[in-house]
Image: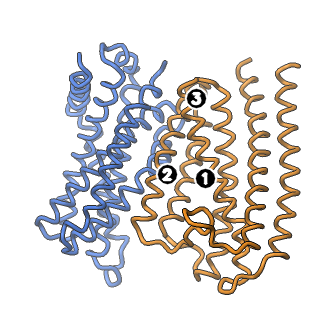
Chain colours: A blue, B orange
Amino acid sequence: MTTFRGALVIAAKDLRVELASRAALTSAVTFAVMVLVIFNFARDPGEVSLAVLAPSVLWVTSAFAGVVTLNRSFAMEQERGAMEGLLLAPVGRSAIYFGKYLANLAFVLTVNAVLLPLFVLFFNVALGVALAWVAGLLVLAAAGYVAIGTVLAAMTVRTRFAELMLPVLLLAFLVPPVLVGVQATTRLLGGRPAGEILGWIRFLAIYDIVFITLGWLLFPATMDE
Amino acid sequence: MTATNEHDSLIRRGLWITALALVALGGVFAQALLRTPVERWQGPAQKILYVHAPAATMSLMAFLLVGVASMGYLFLKDRRLDTFAEASAEVGLAFGAVMLTTGPLWARPVWGTWWQWEPRLTLTLLLVLLFVGYRTMRTAIDDPDDRARFSAVVGIMALVLVPFVHLSVYLFRTIHPQPVIFKPSAPSLPWEMLRVFLMSMVAYLAVYVGFVTTRYGIGRRAAAAEAS
């Protein structure tokens, strides 16, 4: 089986398992919505306008939801001892990495797909081309940090206080995409032309390429020898 | 000589280097206080340069060496590289603490604020936090092989994050003083300041070597105890 087909099979397996219970996705989506709501109450309506706060809220919520989603990504393998089964399957470590990566990316993007319309609703954001660019930025950012999260989650699941270790390590890596995302979103929602954010799109693209590649190289070291 | 003796002599050597380095550092600080001119605009606060900049450099160098040792470990599977990475990460955190305390002390009179959410500050703080996470993760893994491999992965990822940190400094506006010594053109620091600054760098480097040697010896002793 080629790496590509193996990865698809593993990703499809994870998606099927999740769709059967929807436990992780439902919790992650609920969590994201709660964060959105809480941010709204963390603001003094007379002092800070919705428009000023909106980009930061979107990106912080998206990042936190991403961490929560990634936290569960290897829990099944750990709890039911399924990792041995996965390692014995006739696929390489690369296929396991890309399979897990694709499944995690699908979960994170699903949460974001629920988050974005609610964000538009709660923060009174105008529908239009700018919003499509913001959606694109969210996908571009997720493509990078999910790669890092996949590698980190494979390790933290086997440490003590696993659920706490992943955020502690992953949040530092989330800062560049969140920083860039907030800056670009502020400009887009402020009506600036998309050409102004090309530099930041390039930054995110490099971040993605570097960390997807690095994750692929490092992932075998996170599996038992 | 038995293994335990070997580790003990390593620790002793490290402590000696540290003691000598600290004496040298005291001499450098005396020089910085008494023999360097007071900068015209920043006043005496500028003298913190001799403490802050070398500490920041050593901290970043220590983290860099964690990344290099981590790569070495994944290729060679030599446990000594892992022990070195552990030692360098901890010493890097100590220097990081110096960097993060002296920085605000300087910024208060010069910038008028203790802390500025400025990219370089934000991201060096993050790097320190990341290595706090690295150290926390080490203590949360019992199996020494897992611990070494997992730590190496995090060490390498942190190393790769640094260029993104650096790039962001140029992508965003910054009020942090631009490099006056390590830059492509000649250093713009006057010689009487540069002289003491370079002495401070050497003294700090010696402190790093002393600390790491001691901590490495302790780590080797712990690894030997773990194995037996």
Marks 3 and 2 sit apart, C-alpha to C-alpha, by 20 Å
Callout 3 secondary element = helix
Q: How far separated are the C-alphas under marks 2 and 1?
A: 9 Å
Instruction: Determine whether B26 is above or below B219 in the image.
Output: below
Residue occupied by mark 2: B162
Residue beneath label 3, please? B73
Q: Which residue is mark 1?
A: B60
Which residue sits furthest bottom?
Answer: B40
Decide which of tag 3 and tag 2 comes sooner along the chain. 3
The answer to whether B158 appears left or right of B195 in the picture is left
Dot 2: element: helix
What chain letter is assigned to the residue under label 1? B
Residue A189 x %, y %: 21, 70
Q: Residue at x 40, y 16 (%)?
A: A84
Q: Amino acid at mark 3?
A: Tyr
Marks 3 and 2: same chain? yes
- Which comes sooner in the sequence, label 3 or label 1? 1
| Mark 3–mark 2 CB contact (< 8 Å) | no
The image quarter in which residue B43 lies: bottom right
Residue, far left: A128
Q: Residue at point 86% right, 69% down?
A: B30
Q: Is residue B77 above or below residue A47?
A: above
Residue positioned most to the front = B186
